[in-house]
Amino acid sequence: MKDLLGGKGAGLAEMTNLGIRVPSGFTITTEACVEYYKNSEAYPQGMWDQVLENLRRVEEAMGFKFGDINNPLLVSVRSGAKVSMPGMMDTVLNVGLNDKTVQGLARKANNERFAYDAYRRFMTMFGSVVMEIERGKFEEILQEKKDEIRVKQDTELDAAALRDVVARYKKLVKKEAGKDFPMDPLEQLMMAINAVFNSWNAARAITYRKIHNLPHDMGTAANVVAMVFGNMGETSGTGVAFTRDPSTGEKRFFGECLMNAQGEDVVAGIRTPFPIEELKKIVPQAYDELVDIYQKLEKHYRDMLDIEFTIQEGTLYMLQTRTGKRTAASALKIAVDMVGEGLIDQEMAILRINPDQLDQLLHPMIDPDARIKVVAKGLPASPGAAVGRAVFTAEDAERSVREGERCVLVRMETSPEDIGGMHAAEGILTSRGGMTSHAAVVARGMGRPCVAGCSDIQVKEKEKYFRVNDQIIREGDYITLNGSTGEVIVGEVALIKPKLSESFSTMMKWVDKIRRLKVRTNADTPYDAQVARDFGAEGIGLCRTEHMFFEPNRVKAVREMILSEDIEGRKKALTKLLPMQKGDFIEIFRIMKGLPVTIRLLDPPLHEFLPHTDQEIEELSQEMGVPPDRLMAKNKTLFEFNPMLGHRGCRLGITYPEIYEMQARAIFEAACELECEGVKVVPEVMIPLVGYPKELATLKEMVDRVAGEVMKSYKVRIKYQIGTMIELPRAALVADEIARHAEFFSFGTNDLTQTTLGLSRDDSGKFLPFYVEKGIFEVDPFVSLDQEGVGQLVKIGIEKGRSTKSTLKVGICGEHGGDPKSIEFCYRVGMDYVSCSPYRVPIARFAAAQAVLRNKK
């Protein structure tokens, strides 16, 4: 009943049903919190009467009375949402204490020091959480008192000292809040419940939900529970524990405790706790009972748990049980071990893992013990961590690596021409762009950490520095990127290398038995292809040929082709490119050994291959022996106001067929040569940006002709397929006609999202976060597929395409091919495969298996 009671409330109720000792209490539901907000922060009708009624039941169960000066009941008021949000919302302990009940508590416990210690704790917590007085001001008064009587620990303050601290706290509250500290226990209780409800919309809680993609309308429960005290002496204490090691997954009781303390002391780090095993020496009976309980709870919940407890004068009380947070490595080991122990089955083990969390295992990460100085934060565009000296041009990055120096490439935004420097750099930082900008997409494909759209920094590429606030980071200064969080850190930070465990291998075998979607990769180089194969890719779903053109020795031939005034000149330049393209295809085909390789013919507009600044034009002019005026004139003729919707994709192939002809020849010559060597090759030629059936029919005829000529000259037959990328709304709407000329469809959802939503993925980063924050977009549509809009076009495209050709193979090759939610959608609409960047392949395999399990009839 987590939805209604929240995690904490459900855990307390479940432990009560299991006969485990918990303090008496009741839960105000998440529904009440939701109504509280709908009601302009007023309780729903009848709620307060129910609180008072259940408070009386707690009094009867515990044998104390709330507000009674001789036998006072104290309560805690704790938050507890459906999903665990550690430390994000508020808790108030010792509610019910005032100047009179504190004396009753002292008499009842025969311990005046304990009573006033509880009182000063209550005033600190209530004053900071409920009355919003800075907590540090209470801590200052406490420290002043310790200094006055020359003691170091809170536990060394006697009753008289604590009475004086309480008196000073009252003066502080009067000064800061302009009113006295409330002495009416019922007023305290109401204010504490309000504070818990209000903490649901505290800035830190909202930020946490955004980071973890949690809905903002769940609300929190408020748990009103009778207080038990860990600060009543040396046989009292408190602790937090995990039923297994949350970092490694090792099967051992893992936790920390403090004696003569309350729970806040463990969490706040005010005193250094000791390992839980030492509790056996101090209160052996309570420790043995705790071990029995944690084992009982783990068997009941069949999961690793996080538990909180208090020991009051030797008697153990359980305060909380919930699913424990864990690292990816720990999650895998625990799931695999629990299958071995018979607690869960393989399907449950697979569903226990968050596929996105696997990124932790696939990339270097920042050492969690390292001290870091975060100076800026951008978008976590490609996971992992990178350390290196800042450089500001692709050429400097390549030179830096040749000289044996690690570097991080810093740019306002990257372009395809930066590919060499991006490959050379350890990581990439841009001040512009979004999660699917050029920098983000290419970095993910290469496995390079990337922080994109970091608007906190001002990049001065010519001057070779960037500024953040008043700090300047110059070329050669060390910086560290955390691509998993988007953090930019000054200096050189220690990294930890990932290791893939036996549990990872075991789990991936289980995953592959269940999933039905094939998982391919987006790979443009032999290196990318090999990385993806090692991660279990079953082919290449997108090989972008333009990335092969930007290497220095090739881009000259491309520019020569662009500058040619006639078809003969273009063909002459393309003849130089053909053996280079063929060599790339041979290497990639060889790595894929009989697996399908989908090669997209040239897609970007030609102007991307030409320089644009005066300095770059001058340099190229001298290099090629071409007047600068001619280069500038060519740039002008190729200029487009909106190149994304301009002369690109199949439109280039139609107007300059010799380009696509050269590429087709390179593909089939590479395939035939390998076939002659006995290497099986499965080429798939993909025509991009088709919107009209005639476009595909025209280019298919040309590719078929070239394939026939090449196979005839090599005297071999190769099975190949020709298909198209569906990335325009029109293509999806007339997919039945397009399918007459296609053997496969691959949905290019990056561009389909742009053309459907009318959004530029490179420019929309400026306002997309605002749209997400305002709830207009649930998530960034370039990160997770817009299933209601773009997704409907995908569904229409598949249904129409297969109405013409039932055997039509369908996949996705946009960045969404590596997003678990989008992968589940791809499974539901009947795709055959997804294709993603190499380092997302294990994540996609996992998500594909979870899609099957979640969608069982």
Image (tube, rainbow, N blue to C red):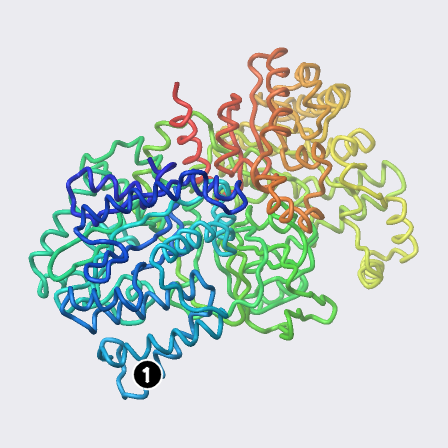
Above/below status of 171 relative to 714: below
Position of residue 632 in the picture relative to residue 207 (left or right): right
Residue 667 or 459: which is nearer the viewer?
Answer: 459
Q: Which quadrant holds residue 120?
A: bottom left
* Secondary element at image label 1: helix
10 Å crowding of disc 1: few (<14), some (14-19), many (20+): some
Q: Position of residue 824 (x, y in %)?
A: 48, 30
Above/below status of 7 relative to 675: below
Q: Amino acid at mark 1?
A: Lys
Q: Residue at x 31, y 80 (%)?
A: 164
Q: Residue at x 71, y 42 (%)?
A: 760
Residue 686 or 376: which is nearer the viewer?
Answer: 376
Residue 700 or 21: which is nearer the viewer?
Answer: 21
Q: How many marks?
A: 1
Q: Which residue is mark 1?
A: 145
| Residue 86 in view in this figure | yes
